[in-house]
Structure formats: structure tokens, C-alpha cells
Amino acid sequence: MLRDIVGAMFQKPITEVYPFERVDVPPALRGKLLWTAEGCTGCMLCVKDCPADAIHLITLDKAAKRFVMEYHVDRCIYCGQCVQSCRFDCLTLQQDTWELAAESQSEFAVWYGAPEDVATVLGAAPAPDRGEA
Amino acid sequence: MLTLLAMLVFPGGLFLIANSVAYEWVDRKVVARLQNRIGPRWFQPFADLLKLLTKEEVIPEGAHVAVFIILPVIALASALTAALTLPVAGLSPVYSYPGDLIVTVYLLSLLTLCLSIAGTNTNSQYGVIGAMRILTQLFAYEAPFLLALLGPAFLTGSWQINEVVAAHGGQWLLFAQPIGFVIAVLSLMGKVELSPFDAPEAETEVVAGALTEYSGRGLALFLLGKKVVLLVGLLLIAALYMGGIANPLDYIVKTLLLLLIITVIQALLARLRIDQTVGVWWHYGVLGIFIQWLWLLVQGT
Amino acid sequence: MNTQTFVFPIGPQHPALKEPCHLEITVSGEIISDATIRLGYAHRGIEKATEGRNWTQNLYLLERVCGICSHSHAMTYALGVEALAGVTAPPRAQAIRTLVAEMERIHSHLLWLGVSAHEAGFDTLFMYSWRDREIIMHLLETVTGNRVNYSVNLLGGVKVDITDAMIRALHEGVDQLEARTTHYLEVVTSDAAFLQRTRGIGTMSSEQAFSLGVIGPVARASGLARDVRVDAPYAFYDEFPVQMVTEQTGDLEARFVVRLKELFESYRVIRELIDHLPAGELQARMPRRIKAGETISRIEAPRGELFYFIRSGGGETPERIKVRTPTLCNISSVLVTMMNQHLADIPMILVGVDPCFSCNDRAVAVNDGRWTWQQLRQYGIDYYRRKGDSC
Amino acid sequence: MSDPNLKTTPAAAAALKQAASWLAAWTSTSAWPEANRLDLTLRVEHLLDAVRTLAEQRWGILSAITGLDHGPESGRMEVLYHFCAGAAVLTLRIDLARETAVVPSVCDAIPSARLYEQELRELMGVGVDGLPEAGRLFLADDWPTDIHPLRKDAQMPERKTP
């Protein structure tokens, strides 16, 4: 152990001083989920397989492919199962968005979809925490 | 008036407290660096102390309230009093008298006694076991500690610290009496319960030992008392074994050097079990100090 | 030392325990004369919860039985479900599973080394071994995207692929780790102060180990040759066999030595795996409904044999999943080996079997209801008031 | 009697056949459900004899005890004793009536079974004859005594909110 101790005197401390200095995150990192409406058919496989009940897909008009996705950042466990389940590549876990702390629970509810559709859904359901889609 | 100021502010009292807290930072920082970590920033020990002082103090049921409150005060006060006879900051001692060496050593032990009483007073199993261990450890290192400190005094025929120091005239006794020096340093570590002699407060066994039930002000004072005892002990050993302390520079360099030695030992060793601690002291410590004294006696005659 | 006995509680919250359990230890002075244990503080109802989720969701639920051996749980489950469905994951997927399993073993053993050094009050070894554990954590993050709960597995395969850049990083990391492990093996077998706390402490003879039914590294440290990777090779272990590491003495030192020597095996297997990674698909098609049947899936988790019994009724959800974790086998041995040892050795002996209480306890939080801070506070006050009354 | 399609290793097959021959007198049915696995169905009164025989012969270790509830409609439940020896897994299946499910404790033969049996009793509600009542092991102290969460028809108690 003496060798380590003496060696350490001539070494830079190993501690990472995040957030003052940032280290690169690996390319495989799974961050915040992103849903793109394009290609989504509303098959609901992602919602069914989500182990954490973090995503809900609200169907406004199935024929016209108008969907809104309600995503709960705080419930998501970033396992990537929804990305695997989606056959149309609508979902990605973004590698660069991973600092997701927020000060209130309401900030964790994220709505994806065309702005007017989101407005419709939010207008129709003012309660922030809806049980199901 | 001036004496009062000297006792309460500088070089006694406040200065000692600030100094010992700063030394705690040095200790923590160096250990961290030895372990390849960054360690705390300079104000962390002060912040810890201030935080503890502002926290609520919870007095456990069944504890004797007055004793519970007064013990930390006695502990800190005795540690601070012990410093009066020493050349703090390289200045001459505030209050020096024949036989003050013995008084100082016993004032330092008062903290240990207060800790053990505090442990048994709190009615917690951890506290009781911690107190038992503190006393067991006290019996292990106390006699060698006293003998190690009396070694330098023995040759001069005086038991007054500054006379002893003056009589050696700046000679570094640690080369003449190496065993005594080593034992003095190790027993100081035992006294303030530093690893590897930290069985009394081994957190993975007895949580915080005698201090388990202490919180807020009481805990702050006890911890501060330990820091002051460490500083006073360093100073005492530096004065006796490292050629006295003549000026502030001497003071800083010599005590820091000692602190560094203690820190490295701390980082290097695993905790000893209490029976092993006692074994080590009675096998090697006592034997060592006897050899040292035998040598002194031969030299003296 | 006095001969008066009293009961010394350890836990549910105690600095020696990184997870909750409750031990009541009767000591005479510093010597232990009796001990009882209470588990269940991390009981989360996982076995019951699996019955209400579909096969895919359960993969992630079971991965969270334990934070350290998360991949082992997911892999055991995935292998079991694949066996039930009659699907075999492609070779490349099996190889990647095996690779991550070995990386997880390294992570777990280094973590354990640090924790047990800390229990012995040897914080410098603790800091250093955890510093070096960061290397493997980084590699795990590079390969899987996560430091813990890697979620590598899918039913029928794996999610992540190994790239050339990862292989280079793995080679580099494993070389570093191997050098460090050699050093630690030297430290734990030669540091005099540390040996005082490990040699001859908590000894379990091979006879005792057999009757107590211990498994994993604890059994191997007592000379019992039990390793599922060798006995019943799964995933890719029949292609890349591991050598079983056993020691005879059965004390804490032997447990250190076994775990550290196992690391060298892991390094060797990882190197061979990444050099001979089979090409091909990552996932085989899995049906959503698993045909009715029962299966037993066993793998060697870092702490010992992990046992899953899975029964399907033919639907989208399992009918019964039984999880038997290695800690449940090993924990009762602690109570026996503790007898007549010093109080100061309890943490070391307890940690010596590398207990994982969240593995152990698993299964009951059902109704979803959020508590506010005020409610929690009030609950605490009421609870202790009730408790105070009954005393 | 082994299914040729199953990839049972010769060593495991030999070990399992050996065990089956010891227990033949008490076995009512046997099956080879998977590679390296043999299931023997026993009547509950023969369980202790069978377990004792395996323990005396030092055949593997008792790896787990699984309680299996077949639901209130069937009125049946099973307790499975899994023994592992190397690659071989021998399962002793005990068929029980749901309402009066009691098995004898095997702790005398295999001391390490205590935790498994306690788990079986608490979570499955199978009585274990001869196992001392020693407080709760897994469930909370204030959990109702008549609710066994792993039974199919278990009604979870309402969470008490202050």
C-alpha cells in the first residue's frame, strides 16, 4: 500500500469535478426520449412494453395519423425497450440530453406532437397527471 | 488583563480552536491526496463545526441531562487549559509552573474520561461498548505515553516544560531517544482515536462509539476537543522531542511535520481490533518504553 | 473484560450495512454468543409484481431486483423465457451476454473488495479499489450506455453491439485492471495489519459449508467446487470455459483470494471473447405469448448460483416466477460462523459472504399512492408514539 | 426413460437416474421436462423420507423451495423442492389441497432450508409443520397474518395513509 500512497502524491487526483469539468459521455448513452410523429402508426407496442408506464400515446385521429405522445421523464428508466419495440423508428433516446433534473414534477411531463394537437389534448384534459391515454 | 486576553484569544482560546480546525483540514486533505482524491476545500472543517453548532441538540431519554450537557464543555475546556503551559505559536507559555508537564498530560486525558462517561451516560449499546473500548485503550497507551514524555524531562531533573526544553538547548531528542518519540506519537494517535487505533469509534461496528447519541452543540464541542487535544499533543511532542519551539516558524514547521507523519500512518494501516490494540501496546509499547528508560538510566548514572 | 451479556443490535440502519437488515447479537464482553437475523426491509413484492406484467416488461423489472448483479438477473430470466419459447438467441448475442456478465463480475468483486476493506477500517484500500472499479464502470458504460442496470438483454437477444473501438477500450481497460488486481492480491495476502483482521476469522470448514448449503465464492473459499459456469455451462461458457478457483482454508482471507483470483479468469475470458466474437444477428424473433410450460434457469451470478423458476400459462404474462438469489443461501452461514468471534469482526464476516439484501428480499408495494412530506413526517411521529406506548 | 431429444449430459442423466432409483418406492409419477431435469411427484407423507435419503447420500444441495399456486378454481397448489447437483436438477413435486396446504419441515435433514421454508410460509401461506414460529422474515411486522401475497387470490391490504 505504501507504493500507492507515495505514488498518489505525484498523481493528479482521480476525482471528477463535475459539473465544473465535464467528461465525454459514451456514444451508447441513453438519454431523454424523443418521439417523431413521422411514420407512427399508433400500434401502441411501445406503450404496451414500457416497463415504467412512462409513455402514453393519445390518438386524435388514427386514419389521419394524428397522435400526441405524453412522456414522463421522471418515470422513464431509459431502458430503450420502446426504441426496440418500434418498427418505424419513431423513437430515439438522445445521447446528448441527459442532464434532466428539474425543480418540480410538472416539468417532467413532456408532450410531443404537432403543436396544435398538443394544444387540443392539453385543452381537453387540463389535469397534468392523467391515468391513461 | 493581558493574561486574560492571552488565555481567551491569542495564543490560547480562539487561536487554538482556529488552529486545530485548520490542522484538521490539513489532515483530511493530505489523507485524501494519499488516496488519490481531491479532499475538502479549506473552509470545510469550519463549515462542519458551524453547522453542528447551529443544529438541534437531542438529549436521549434516560441520560442524566446535566452530565450530558456539561461533559463536552469539560472536555474542550481541559484540552484548552492544557495548552496554557505550552509554547503555542512559538511564544512563551502563558502560565508555567514546576510540574506542569504532569498536569498537562492529565488534562489531555480528561477528554478521554469525559468521552467514556458520556458513552455510558447515553444508555445506548453503541455508546457503552464505545466507552468500554475507550477505557481499555486508555489503559493500553496511557502509561507508555506518560513515560515517553517524561523521558526528556528525566535527564534535566525538572518537570516544567519550558525548563526541560531550555535545558536541551534546541537539541533534537528524537535521534537520542527514538523509541520514546515513536511511542509518544503512536499514543497520541490512540488518544485521539485515529486509525489504526480507532476501534472505540469504529463506524462499521459501533457507529460512532461513545458519541453515537450526541448531536448538535455537544457533538461539536467533543469533536473540537479532540482536535485541540491532537494539536496540543503535537505541540508537546514537538517541544520535547524536536528541539523546542522558539518562534512561529518553528511552531508551524515542526507541528505540521508531525501531523504529516501521523497522517501517513493513518492512511497506511487497517484498523486494529480492540484486543489487538491492547496486545500491541503491552507487547511492543511497554517493552519499548522500558528499553528506552533503561538506556536513560544507564546514561543518567 | 466482563462476562455480562447484552444484546447488541445491528441495523436496520447501521454504517456497516449498505443495505438494510437487522441482526441481534448477544455479546459477552466483546465475544459473540448468539445471533438472530431479520430480513425483509427491502422487500418490494417483485415476485408478485411479475404476475401482473407482460414478458417484456418483466425483463426490466427483474433487472432491478439488484443493482449490482442486474445483468445476471435479466440474463437468467431471458435465458429461461427463451427456453420456454423454444427460441435460441444468436451466438453473437450469447457472446455479448457472457461478456457483460463477466464485466459485471469484475465490477461486483471490486466493489466487494472496497466494501470489505472499509469494514476493516482500511479506507485507503477501499478508495483505491473503488478508483480502479471506475475503469470497469467506464467500460460498462461504453459498451452498454449505463453504469448499472445496463439493460443489455432483450428477449431473444441483446440490444447493444460491440464495435472495434469498444474492443480496443476493453483490451486497454482489462490490462490496467489486471495489473491492479495483481497488486491487490499481494496486498490482501501480505499486509500484516490487514491479515490480522482476515486470517483465521470467520472460518467455515468444507464440511460446515456443505451442511449450511453455501454457494458461490463463499463455497469455493471453503473448498467446495460449485460454479454453475463450469457445472452447467450456459450462454457462451461452453465455448469459452472458465477454470474454477477454489481455496481450502475457508476463512476471510480465502474469500478475498478466491474473489480476486476469479477476476483473472474473468479478464482471460473477456479477452478471448472480444478476440473471437462470432458475427451475426443480435436478436431472434420472440413470440409475444410464451407457450405453457415450466423451466428452471440457473446462472452463476457474482455472488453464487442464481436460480429462476419460470412457469408460463401460455399467455402474455407469466404465471409464476420464483427467484432464489445467492444471498438467501449464504446469509444463514453468517450466523453460524459468527459464533465466538469478536464483535469487531461482525461487519467483516457479514460482508464476507457479500450479502445483497435487495436481492434477498425482493417481493410488496402495491397500491400506488404518493405521500406528501407532511404525511410521511406525521406517519413517523405516530409510529414512534405507538411504539413508545407499547414499550 | 429419458427423452432422447433432450440434451441431458451423461453425468447428469446418471446422477438423476441414481436419485430416481433411491426414491422409486415413494414416486408416484416422474417426468423429464427439460435437459438435465427430472421431476418426481411424491405424496406429502413421503417427502421427509425422500429428502432424508437425498441428504444422507449427499445428493446435491437443496437449491430452492418453490410454492406454486394453481388458483382458487383448481383448489390445488404445489410445493417444489429443487435439488441441484452439478448440471442435474431434481425436482420433488408435492401436490396439496389449497385450503389445507401443509408440508413437513425438512430442516432436520437440511438445516439451510429454514429460510426457504419461512419464505414459503409467509408469502405462499403453506403451513410448515415443525418449523418454529420465529417472527416475520420478509413481510412487515404489521402485515395481516392471513394475507399471503403470492397466492393468486391475495387481496392486498389498503395502504394506511395518515
Image (spheres, rainbow, N blue to C red):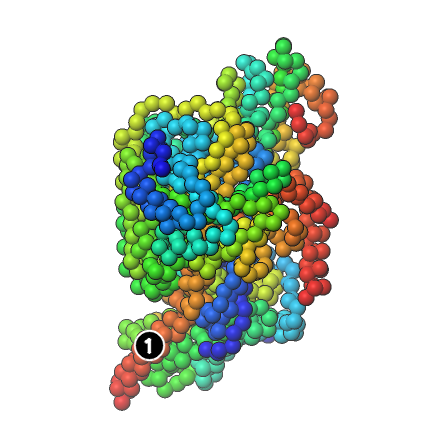
Quadrant containing the C terminus of chain A in the rendered view = top right
Q: Position of residue C211 (x, y in %)?
A: 39, 58
Pick the residue in front: B4 or C213.
Answer: C213
* Residue type indicated by callout 1: His
Dot 1: element: helix
Taking the image as shown, residue A4 lies to the left or right of residue C355, namely: left
Q: Position of residue B66 (x, y in %)?
A: 65, 74
Query: Looking at the image, is A27 positioned above or below residue B134?
Result: above
Query: Looking at the image, is D94 positioned above or below residue B288?
Result: above
Which residue sits at x=61%, y=61%?
A: B216
Pick the residue in front: C181 or D123.
Answer: D123
Residue C94 visible to the viewer = yes
Query: Looking at the image, is A115 positioned above or below residue D88?
Result: above
Pick the residue in front: C373 or B16.
Answer: C373
Query: Residue under mark 1: which chain is it in?
Result: B
Pick the residue in front: C176 or C34.
Answer: C34
Q: Position of residue B146 (x, y in %)?
A: 40, 79
Which residue sits at x=51%, y=56%?
A: D105
Q: In the picture, residue C224 is in which quadrant?
A: bottom left
Give the class, few, some or many, for how many residues have Cα within 10 Å of label 1's Cα (few <14, many ≥20). Answer: few
**Which residue was labeled with disc 1?**
B283
Which residue sits at x=68%, y=45%?
A: D157
Taking the image as shown, residue B154 lies to the left or right of residue C276, namely: right
Farthest top residue in view: A64
Which residue sits at x=45%, y=84%?
A: B99
Quadrant containing the N terminus of chain A in the rendered view = bottom left
Query: Looking at the image, is C139 positioned above or below residue C200?
Result: above
Q: Position of residue D69 (x, y in %)?
A: 57, 42
